[in-house]
Amino acid sequence: MVPLPGRAADAVTDAIQAAYAPYRAALFRTNSKAQAESEQAIAAARGQWRTLAERHGTRPGAPYDRDAAFAATLKQVDEVYARAEAQIGARQLPEAHETLEKARDLLSELRRRNNVVVFSDHMNAYHEQMEHVLIDGAKALAQPGGLLEVAALAGTLDYLARRLRSEAPAALAQDGEFKPLSDAVLASVGALRSAIARQDEAAVREAIGKLKAPYSRLFLKFG
């Protein structure tokens, strides 16, 4: 968990981004199947979210003051946390991880309909395309001509990886940990594209399998 890498234009977005840090930790820990750490992370995430809801839920500042669904979205996020907390308590960490993913979508949609863009949105765009590569890319390799489809997917992923650098706020870009972590993401995509260029299917499969780890480390710290 780190301070906000850059301030948003309003207090509510700043508060949401601050509350996003323990959420990221909960996602990471459930994915790592770390029971005790997952319990701690979800408790922190839910506690910080409740504080945010108490402070901003009924009378949010601009631009959220015109969003009739603002309070409902805050409640939906808390419900996601509650469900994930119960699953973690039942030692169902993979299920809890999938449940927690829904909060990311809710917050992304909240920002979208209020014309707010933060660095997390660029991380989410990369994550969505990475999932396509992990799932659809692996399937495509089993089909004739599938390497061309993987090449197209990897090209989009490369574009989005580069935007993680170009769209990073100045304070984030100047953080000493950001460059090596983002370099690792770019390198993982570069390894995939290199394997595709060599038409080495085994290397392509290996490179696809190595995409998630560097993204997860960057997401945990700055996502």
Image (spheres, grey):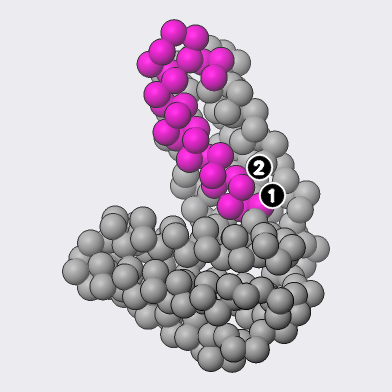
State which region is magenta: 122-149
**Residue at the extreme left of the image, as rendered:** 90
Residue 31 screen position, x and y as percent: 36, 56
Label annotation for residue 44: none
Q: Is residue 43 left or right of residue 207?
A: left
Label annotation for residue 161: 2
Q: Quadrant of the C terminus?
A: bottom right
Q: Is residue 154 left or right of residue 65?
A: left
Q: Is residue 150 left or right of residue 112?
A: left
Task: Give the residue drawn at x 56%, y 65%.
Answer: 107
Asked if the residue at tag 1 contacts the one at tag 2, i.e. Cβ–Cβ closer than 8 Å, the answer is: yes
Against 151, is 34 above or below? below
- Res 159 quadrant in image: top right
**Nearest the eye: 6 or 120:** 120
Q: Quadrant of the N terminus?
A: bottom right
Q: Which residue is mark 1?
A: 164
Residue 102 screen position, x and y as percent: 44, 60
**Nearest the eye: 51 or 169:** 51
Task: Give the residue drawn at x 53%, y 85%.
Answer: 53
Mark 2 Cα shell of 10 Å, populated few (<14), some (14-19), many (≥20)? many
Magenta: predominant secondary structure element?
helix
Q: Is residue 216 on the magenta stretch?
A: no
Task: Give the residue drawn at x 58%, y 21%.
Answer: 151
Against 182, is 38 above or below? below
Mark 1 Cα shell of 10 Å, populated few (<14), some (14-19), many (≥20)? many
Residue 148 screen position, x and y as percent: 56, 15
How much space separates mark 2 and mark 1, taking CA atoms? 5 Å
